[in-house]
Amino acid sequence: MKKFVAIIAIVFISSSILFAGVDKAPVAKASVNGVIVDKATGEALAGVKVSIEEINKVVYTDLDGNFEFESLSTGTYNIKTDLISYEDNKMKVDVEATTSLKIEVKSE
């Protein structure tokens, strides 16, 4: 009898875990990508720290100045850039689906 009760309990717990989030509506996903360039020369900048403050995500630009944030919820985000010898840049971006940016930064 104890084995039967244990099996029933395991089945009940397993099924409740499996179906716990079934009734939740899917959250729309979006992405932000872009390129960071020097404002004066138009040259792509590698190694720029690009961050989204609201969700504490950070990426760095590649050798061609490109960056990308994936699997974001739609909404408004503050995107900040940071690179030695350049002024910090902060911009507010409305993200709906895939948003592409060209961010120009000014040297100090």
Image (spheres, rainbow, N blue to C red):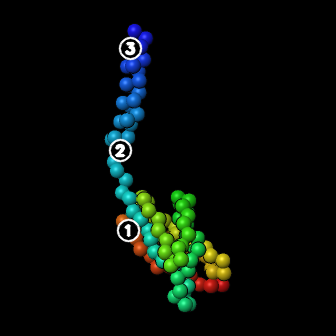
Residue shown at 40%/9% (left/top)?
1
Percent x, y for residue 11? Answer: 37, 25
Determine whether label 3 and label 1 are within 8 Å by CB. no
Residue shown at 39%/29% (left/top)?
14
Percent x, y for residue 108? Answer: 66, 84
Quarter where residue 87 is shown: bottom right
Q: CA distance from mark 3 to mark 1?
A: 53 Å
State which mark lies toward you, 2 or 1: 1
Identify the residue position indicated by label 3 in the image: 4
Q: CA distance from mark 2 to mark 1?
A: 24 Å
Percent x, y for residue 78? Answer: 52, 67
Q: Residue furthest front?
A: 63
Which dot marks residue 81?
Answer: none
Identify the residue position indicated by label 2 in the image: 24
Q: Which of the two residues, 90 or 62, is positioned nearer the viewer here? A: 62
Q: Report the amino acid beneath label 1.
A: Thr
